[in-house]
Structures are given as structure tokens and as C-alpha cells.
Image (tube, rainbow, N blue to C red):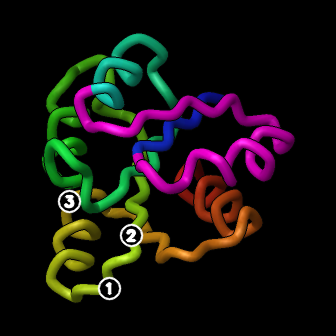
Amino acid sequence: MWLLFSSWTIESRSRGGVSPEGYTVLEANRAADALEKAREHRPDVVIIDVKLPDMTGSELLKHIKDDPRLSATKALFYTAFYDDEDIAKAIQVSGCAVLKKPVTDKEIIRQVDAALK
């Protein structure tokens, strides 16, 4: 199971909590790097920070969904910003949950499992 985190704040804590559950975790700090890794590894799920340094999470997800090799990839958004407009847009684009920082490893795993069903 491949899981790609695209965020500059989640990587250090995700390593310890998510990997033991059978997920191979890839990490990227910028949207361009995340897209490159997604194309190379074709993750089952991407967890995308709503606000990335080089584009929005919604823009990154659009690039992923527009790529025929990645269009079936499940997505979750991850944010510390609780702006209702950003969250509504993220849910509309992804059709998946939005994980609000801080989030526990257990909740990440629960949401990933739900996205894969």
C-alpha cells in the first residue's frame, strides 16, 4: 500500500505512526515534488496539505486527477486552516475527508482506510 503525504509539517510524525500499519509512506514538501513522486510510485492514497508553498492542495489534486495513470488515486486533504471556504472547496474537489491538524495517527489510518473502501 503506497501512501503519499504532501505537506511540510506532517512528515516527521507520520513516519512512526502510519508505516507500521502496512503502508509505505512517501513524503513531499512541495506540490511539484509530490506530483513527481505520485507519477513514479502511483500511490493508493494521497494526503495533501490544503496550503502548499508552490500551489494549493486543490490545484495539486487537479493535476493528479487529470493524469490518466493517477486518476483513480484516492485523496484526503490535511489542514491547520479551518477556513470554511477552503475546506468546502477541498471536499468538493476530492470527495473525501479533510483531516484537521493536529490529527492523531489513529485518525489518519481510519480516514485512509475509509477512503480505500
Q: Label for residue 82?
A: 1
For the residue marked with disc 3, what is the amino acid? Val
The segment highlighted magenta reads: 7-32
Q: Position of residue 27 (x, y in %)?
A: 51, 34
Q: 84 left or right of 73?
A: left
Q: 24 left or right of 46?
A: right
Q: Is residue 110 above or below residue 36?
A: below
Q: Nearer the viewer, mark 3 or mark 1?
A: 1
Identify the residue at horizontal 14%, vertical 46% (top origin).
Answer: 55
Mark 3 and mark 1: span between their CA atoms? 17 Å
Residues marked 3 and 1 touching at CB (< 8 Å): no
For the residue marked with disc 1, what is the amino acid? Tyr
Q: 45 left or right of 19?
A: left
Mark 2 and mark 1: span between their CA atoms? 7 Å
Q: Label 3, on which residue? A: 93
Q: Position of residue 6 (x, y in %)?
A: 41, 43
Query: Splitting the image into 4 quarters, where does residue 79 fall?
Result: bottom left
Residues marked 2 and 1 touching at CB (< 8 Å): yes
Q: Position of residue 92 (x, y in %)?
A: 20, 68
Q: Label 2, on which residue? A: 79
Identify the residue at horizontal 40%, vertical 20% (top origin).
Answer: 37
Mark closer to the chain start, 2 or 3: 2
Identify the residue at horizontal 69%, vertical 29% (top origin).
Answer: 24
The verdict on residue 101 being magenta is: no
Q: Is residue 68 above or below residue 58?
A: above
- Mark 2: give few (<14), some (14-19) or many (20+) Cα within 10 Å: many
Query: Splitting the image into 4 quarters, where does residue 104 fall?
Result: bottom right
- Mark 1: give few (<14), some (14-19) or many (20+) Cα within 10 Å: few
Mark closer to the chain start, 3 or 1: 1
Q: Secondary structure at mark 1?
A: loop
Q: Secondary structure at mark 3?
A: helix
For the residue marked with disc 2, what is the amino acid? Thr
